[in-house]
């Protein structure tokens, strides 16, 4: 009996390791986009992914045909959303370095919807169900976020130069 249990645990560990080897890079990229951290300095994204993978591993035997990638991505998104909600006005994670990248200018909810829809290819209906929002709200948020990304606000206008003076 003990040998059979050890064999089952070893099989489970091998299956999970194979999943992580194939999916971790893409999931880390999505988590890094969510946290708006740099690709080389992303402790918040790594923490998000580690917690999501731990949750997936804990429920590995109960997946019953469910896609482990989808399950883990959902966990990353939900943990990010919860963390962003509890840290209003703050960046996700313990390390609060300045956000970088194009998505850093977006609010956390906008970032989440853009990453799920545009980078991960999750349908609006699935995103809405995951976040508990109406589908139209998801579409509106993504449209605004996309417009903000494509047409970022301009910086301040240059100071007016009076005739006869040289610009400094």
Image (cartoon, rainbow, N blue to C red):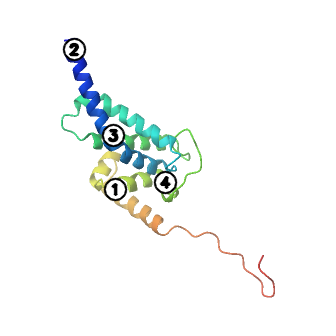
Identity of the residue drawn at 55% across and 51% down: 99
- Residue 3, which numbered label? 2
**Residue 53 location in percent, x, y?**
36, 35
User: What whole-number distance in Å separates the C-alpha atoms at marks 3 and 4?
Assistant: 31 Å
Write down the residue under mark 3.
21
Of residue 146 and residue 51, the one placed in the foreground of this image is 51
Q: Quadrant of residue 59?
A: top left
Disc 3 secondary structure class: helix
User: What whole-number distance in Å separates the C-alpha atoms at marks 2 and 3?
Assistant: 27 Å
User: What whole-number distance in Å separates the C-alpha atoms at marks 4 and 2?
Assistant: 52 Å
Label 1 packing within 10 angstroms: few (<14), some (14-19), many (20+): some
Identity of the residue drawn at 28% across and 50% down: 126
Badge count: 4
Frontmost of labels 3 and 4 is 3
- Residue 107, which numbered label? 4
Disc 4 secondary structure class: loop
User: What whole-number distance in Å separates the C-alpha atoms at marks 3 and 1?
Assistant: 24 Å
User: What whole-number distance in Å separates the C-alpha atoms at marks 1 and 2?
Assistant: 45 Å
Q: Earlier in the sequence, mark 4 or mark 2?
A: 2
Q: Earlier in the sequence, mark 4 or mark 1?
A: 4
- Any part of residue 137 in sight: no
Frontmost of labels 4 and 2 is 2
**Whether label 4 touches label 1, CB < 8 Å:** no
Q: Earlier in the sequence, mark 3 or mark 1?
A: 3
Write down the residue under mark 1.
117
Q: Earlier in the sequence, mark 3 or mark 4?
A: 3
Q: Quadrant of residue 139?
A: bottom left
Relative to 146, 68 lies left or right: left
């Amino acid at each position: 009996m003990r040998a059979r249990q050890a064999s089952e645990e070893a099989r489970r560990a091998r299956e999970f390791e194979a999943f992580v080897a194939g999916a971790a890079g893409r999931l880390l990229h999505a988590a890094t986009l969510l946290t708006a951290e740099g690709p080389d300095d992303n402790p918040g994204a790594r923490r998000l992914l580690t917690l999501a993978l731990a949750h997936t591993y804990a429920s590995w035997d109960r997946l019953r045909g469910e896609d482990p990638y989808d399950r883990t991505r959902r966990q990353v998104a939900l943990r990010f959303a919860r963390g962003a909600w509890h840290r209003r006005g703050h960046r996700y994670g313990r390390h609060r370095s300045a956000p970088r990248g194009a998505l850093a200018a977006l609010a956390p909810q906008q970032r989440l919807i853009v990453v799920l829809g545009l980078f991960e290819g999750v349908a609006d209906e699935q995103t809405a169900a995951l976040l508990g929002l109406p589908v139209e709200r998801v579409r509106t948020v993504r449209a605004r976020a996309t417009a903000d990304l494509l047409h970022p606000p301009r910086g301040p206008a240059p100071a007016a130069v009076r005739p006869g003076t040289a610009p400094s």
